[in-house]
């Protein structure tokens, strides 16, 4: 049931992203992170260096996409 809750939660985040393709794709790639963590916790499957590097890239891309989206939503300040 925990996995179902995670999937429902991630789907809700994707739908709540306001249609931003960049943010939506980052949420979809986050499934790789959760699958790796579930495999590590549940089945004692080691996370390889390549997997850890990919997880790092996904996290950096997600943070960057979020920051860029927030910048675009802020109104330009009047000087």
Image (cartoon, helix red, strand yellow):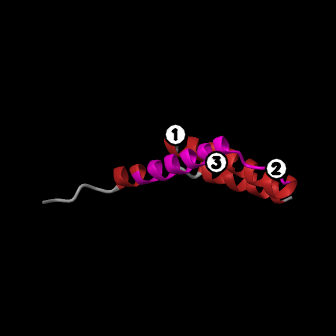
Q: Which residue in the structure is indicated by mark 3?
A: 52
Q: Which residue is identified by label 2?
A: 45
* Mark sitting on residue 43: none
The residue at the point 61 percent across, 43 percent down is 54
Between marks 2 and 3, how big is the CA–CA gap? 13 Å
Find out whether the residues at labels 2 and 3 contact each other: C-beta distance under 8 Å.
no
Viewer-side residue, 70 vs 32 = 32
Is residue 78 in the magenta section?
A: no
Magenta stretch: helix, strand or loop mostly: helix
Q: Between residue 68 and residue 34, name the one nearer to us.
A: 34
Q: Determine the secondary structure under disc 3.
A: helix
Give the residue at the far left of this rendering.
79
- Please state if 20 lies on the left or on the right of 34 as rendered: left
Residue situated in front as seen by the camera: 79 or 35 = 35
Residue 35 in percent (x, y) is at: 75, 48
17 left or right of 29 in image: left
Badge 2 element: loop
**In the image, is residue 53 above or below residue 79?**
above
Q: Which mark is residue 21?
A: 1
CA gap, disc 1 to disc 2?
Answer: 32 Å
Q: Which residues are magenta?
A: 44-67
Measuring from the top left, give residue 74's x and y in whole percent. Answer: 33, 56
Q: Residues within 10 Å of mark 3 (few under 14, many from 20)?
A: few
The residue mark sitting in front, 1 or 3, is 3
Query: Mark 2: few, some, or many residues within 10 Å (few <14, many ≥20)?
Result: few
């Amino acid at each position: 049931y925990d996995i179902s809750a995670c999937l429902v939660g991630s789907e809700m985040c994707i739908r709540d992203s306001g249609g931003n393709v960049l943010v939506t794709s980052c949420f979809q790639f986050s499934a790789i992170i959760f699958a790796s963590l579930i495999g590590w916790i549940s089945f004692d499957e080691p996370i390889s260096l390549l997997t850890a590097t990919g997880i790092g890239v996904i996290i950096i891309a997600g943070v960057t996409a979020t920051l860029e989206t927030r910048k675009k939503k802020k109104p330009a300040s009047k000087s």
